[in-house]
Image (spheres, helix red, strand yellow):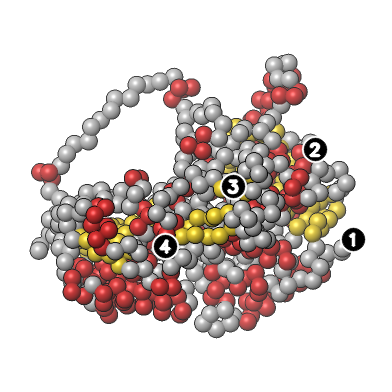
Amino acid sequence: MKDTRFAHLKDIPSAHLLGAGTAMCAGCGGLLAVREIHEVLGDRTVFVNAAGCMTLLSTYPFTPFSGSFLYTAMASAPAGAQGVRDALDVLARKGRLAPEDDLSVVVLTGDGSASGMGLSATSAAIDRGLDFLYVCYDNEGYGNTGQQASATTPLGARTATTERGSVASKKDLFGIWAANRPAYVATAIGSEPVDLARKVEKASKIRGPKLLLVLAPCPTGWGFESDQLVEIGRLAVKTGAWPLKEVEGGKIVHTKVPPKRAPVEEYLRAQGRFAHLFEPSRDEATLASIQQSVDAYWRTVTVG
Amino acid sequence: MSGAVYRVRLHGRGGQGIKTAGRVLGTALFLEGFEVQDAPRYGAERRGAPIFAFVRAARGPILERGAIQRPDLVLVADDTVVVVPAAGVLAGVTSRTVMVLCSEQPEDVWRARLAPKGPLHVLPLPLEDRGATSLRHVGMACAGAAARLLGVVSLASLRKAIETELAGVGRAAIDSSLAAAERSFVALSEHAGAAAPGEPIAASGYERPVFVELLCEPVLEATAMVHGARTSELVKTGLWRTVRPEVHAELCHKCHWICASSCPDGAISASESGVARVDYDHCKGCGVCVVACPHHAIAAVPERSTEVPK
């Protein structure tokens, strides 16, 4: 982390590149992250959106972006990004686009698309070595349509389609992406803005497919008061439920290791989607299983 | 009575239980043997944005569809939506429409403001909800009030509907919902049956929509394209707010990047003096900055407690 201009929170630009007045929920964790990412990338950016919550950022004739926004179908954002990148490259080759006028291409996608129907197009874009930044805001369900379960819904979480809590575990998108060996892969969260800014900065200096998985705490879908957004994010990191990491030179590096992990219960208790694990009686088996999976993960992590 | 349809509209903000209130009322009417429709109106807006739910009930088949244009009963869980034109609280209200407002303001204030031609009742806000980030039980209070004003729902059916619709949210939440619904059910007992069902809509009263001829345009003109940057700032999402963050300049340490960087909407910036400044045109009142400020320099003030909105 030597080559970074972000040492402190105040180093993060606040040019308000992402305009206010969007239809995102009050206290949206995805919006917080997208706003931070836009600030770091600057206004010479094309956002290619897969259908999801962030579709509502740009509802004609309104857009919050300083750069461009292209809306694509749910499964095809990486293909849309390929088209934009190719068009820019062709213009540059023909001398019609000066190098300083080039744009960076960013995909915005929710976890429902990223872990489901969009996975194929993402994998193909990595195979082709597409030069783009793929940002998945992960609110662990199909939030835009009322929080139905997605492949990234964690064990025990109640959604509109898992009323007694999900029996499946969260799909490891980071692992799937990393196995494809793209140029850069990282996880992040809006409540750790310096860590997020450094990762976006690093990705923007690398050519090729760069993928960023951002946990997006969702007040409506997860069942917490909107003012708890940052607190929920901190608990996710502090309990080890959301590891902050990146792949550098084929090696996974953890960018923020909780010194003494708090029990994952602290994170679960703060959210309505896990309330049934505590009331009317404690579901010890599921709680133990969640804690064990967090512990098992961190046992594999070598620090330093 | 045959063919008559009860038409109820519930207004409030996303997160106040309006959708659930509609479901509870619908289920309670169903338990009383009615044919029922209940649905929330989904828009692109979210928690904090004005929303409504509607319920129709009749003793026979209901042939109408869509949002209710001529309500018999309108319940407003959050009095701040009354002034939002897009919320449509007063749409289709006539002298036979019964109105209920949950408000800290007394009835005569609302009579003076709205000059309703029909009956109007004010439900005082439940004590535990005053000043809270969200008004958790106002939706349920509206469901209880609606059940009583229709006069065809027993307290037993109302209770059973709440148990059914809230199953799975935990005993404590069900009990407090039952209490909120029952309180307003009892409070309006002398007005039982005040909201009468309206006549079914007849084809003879049908008004044809006006069709607009659209020209076939070249694709670049017909495609939705926006050439400006940040045009979203024309949308005043400040109207969503139920709670307003107020910066106390004397407590503010001018480290505005802490509150500003935690604001999802980017609605905080620094003033010339370095004190944090909230953009009230766009702040949705999520309260993240209130919690984030290490010096407790930002207070959460209920929007309704201020006389003049900024």
Seen as rendered, the residue at the extreme front is B250
Q: Are marks 4 and 3 in contact (CB under 8 Å)?
A: no
Chain identifier of the residue bearing label 2 in the image: A
User: Residue sitting at 73 percent across and 45 percent down?
Assistant: A12
Is the C terminus of chain A in the top left, top right, bottom left or bottom right quadrant?
A: bottom right
Q: Which residue is under mark 4?
A: B16
Q: Measured from the top left, where is residue B269 in percent x and y?
A: 62, 44
Q: Which residue is under mark 3?
A: B277
The nearer-to-camera label among 1 and 3 is: 3
User: Residue sitting at 15 percent across and 61 percent down?
Assistant: B197
**Circles 4 and 1 on the same subunit:** no
Secondary structure under badge 3? strand
Residue type, numbered disc 4: Gln
Q: Measured from the top left, where is residue B207 in percent x and y?
A: 17, 39
Q: Earlier in the sequence, mark 4 or mark 3?
A: 4
Give A251 or B246, whichever is nearer the viewer. Answer: B246
Q: How many marks?
A: 4
Q: Which residue is under mark 2?
A: A205
